[in-house]
Amino acid sequence: MALHSGVLHALATSLPVTVRTPLGLLRGEESGGVRVFRGVPFAEPPVGPLRFRPPVRMKPWKGERDVTHFAPAAIQPGLKSTPQSENCLYLNLWAPQGKGPFPVYVWIHGGGFTSGRSFDPMFDGTELAREGVICVTVAYRLGIFGFLDMEPLLGTGYVGSANNGLRDLIAALEWVRENIAEFGGDPTHVTVGGESAGAKLTDILLGTPSAQPLFRQAISESGGAERLATRTESEAVGRGFSEEWRADTENKLSALLTAPADALLLAQRKFIHLWPQHFPLRAEIDGKLVPRWPVDTIAMGMSRGKRLLIGTNRDESTAFVGPHPQKDPGAADLGNLPVARFDEVFRKYKKIYPQMTEEQRRIRALTAEEYWVPSVRVANAHVKSGGSTWMYRLDFAESSGQLRGFAFHALDLRLVWDRPSAQGGNAATEAALARTMHRAWVAFLKGEAPEAPGLPAWPEYKHRTQDTMLFDTVSRMERRPQKSELRLWKDVL
């Protein structure tokens, strides 16, 4: 099992290390053969006149900048024990000693576009650096600060502001391209990846024209590129938030530019609770940064030549509706479809899965709507464009607790980051699978096929065969898994 950075600090003396970048000197620290730089700014603070504006390139500084501590997380509700701020556009970097060039992994955290942090202990990059990969974890604006169209509220100067979170990620990737060589990284060998919302943003980046020169590979864990809004939908969400803001605070819309962040978060929480759609805050197809549906641009060749590792967990939605959902899925459970359209598909599940309980069918259908089918669509589009693709499904299930027996959402994180947590009789099995999956991911990051000792041969995913690696206690390959289920979703999303 990989050691966390805190453990490494306890075992080895940290020494200062300085790197000169085009923007100025950065002073991090070195410990156990790994150089660490925390809280590195990649854009100007998006505060004051820059609130709700696109990110602005970081200005050079004089002297030496201390980057030995994590910067605050992006402002968000419910993160009481962790420092947070609107001033959040920072990244963290773990690099091997030596000149390199080393491959680079840029990681995007999840959290439903409203929560999460780049410095979660799960994403400590120490072990990746020890294995010859530079790990960069990035922050981006969340909630209304990064994914709300402010044009209906504040005027045409804020058009496209629903894509500011996406723009933040592009700014971080631009920083990597321009600075990573000073840390021994190879700017031509960058992998961008993430899980959940981070994977969805990764998939959107695959179809975003301005992002294409910034990375060579992508890793999508429980993603898909369906969760975007049209301009009409995005404007409606903006107006809906404005009604909540004015009703609750009696403030003018112009007060959005100067109001305390806590007041904005309170209005955001109330708005999300009342809005009749799951995840109303999302990126939009603005006709400029995102010209059309990313799956379409990917299929048209946008991501041609790139390599993609993509997959989902078998029982993703168990994490949200529980192992025993008691009612039919409602709007609050759906990521992409209205209830009536979803029900048309759901009613057919009993025919293809008669052996399942009604509860199991609900979980399977919700997982398909939110994660599995959107990910298959990205994989098929990428293959059509001429990109290399490897598909997986995690079938390995939790061994204890409420979600015992399910491969739920985010279970993959502790496996691919080699942080197994099972105890008792299943501990050795989970540790072995974690090491196997971690090795496969590292091989991919280095430009190789995602192979590892103990895995069967993993051929590339093709539209005709749809070869998929099923990770489990004994992992195996399967052609066209869930093919009958996939037919139910044809032309639905």
Image: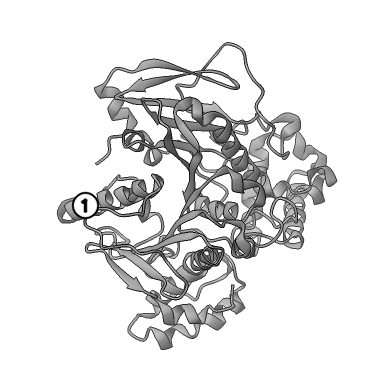
Q: Quadrant of residue 124?
A: top left
Work out whether 405 lies above or below 83: below
Percent across and percent down for residue 4 are 31, 34
Residue 31 lies left or right of residue 52; in this view the side is: left
Give the residue at x 73% y 29%.
Answer: 48
Give neighbour class at mark 1: few <14, some 14-19, many 20+ (Cα, 10 Å): some
Percent across and percent down for residue 394 are 34, 62
> In terms of depth relative to the viewer, which is nearer, 493 or 438?
438
Give the residue at x 21% y 52%.
Answer: 432
The residue under label 1 is: 432
Residue 208 lies left or right of residue 363; in this view the side is: right
Give the residue at x 51% y 53%.
Answer: 306
Point out the residue furthest to the top here.
63
- Which amino acid type is shown beneath numbered disc 1? Ala
Q: Quadrant of residue 101?
A: top left
The quarter of the image holding the N terminus is top left
Percent across and percent down for residue 450 are 35, 54
Point out the residue furthest to the right here.
155
Task: Please indicate, yes or no, whether residue 143 appears anywhere in the rendered image.
Answer: no
Query: Circle 1 sits in a helix, a strand or a loop, which is it?
Result: helix
Point out the residue furthest to the left here.
425
Percent across and percent down for residue 79 are 50, 39
Give the residue at x 38% y 63%.
Answer: 392
Task: Please indicate, yes or no, whether residue 450 appears anywhere in the rendered image.
Answer: yes
Work out whether 423 lies above or below 298: above
The quarter of the image holding the C terminus is bottom right
Q: How is the image coloured?
A: one colour
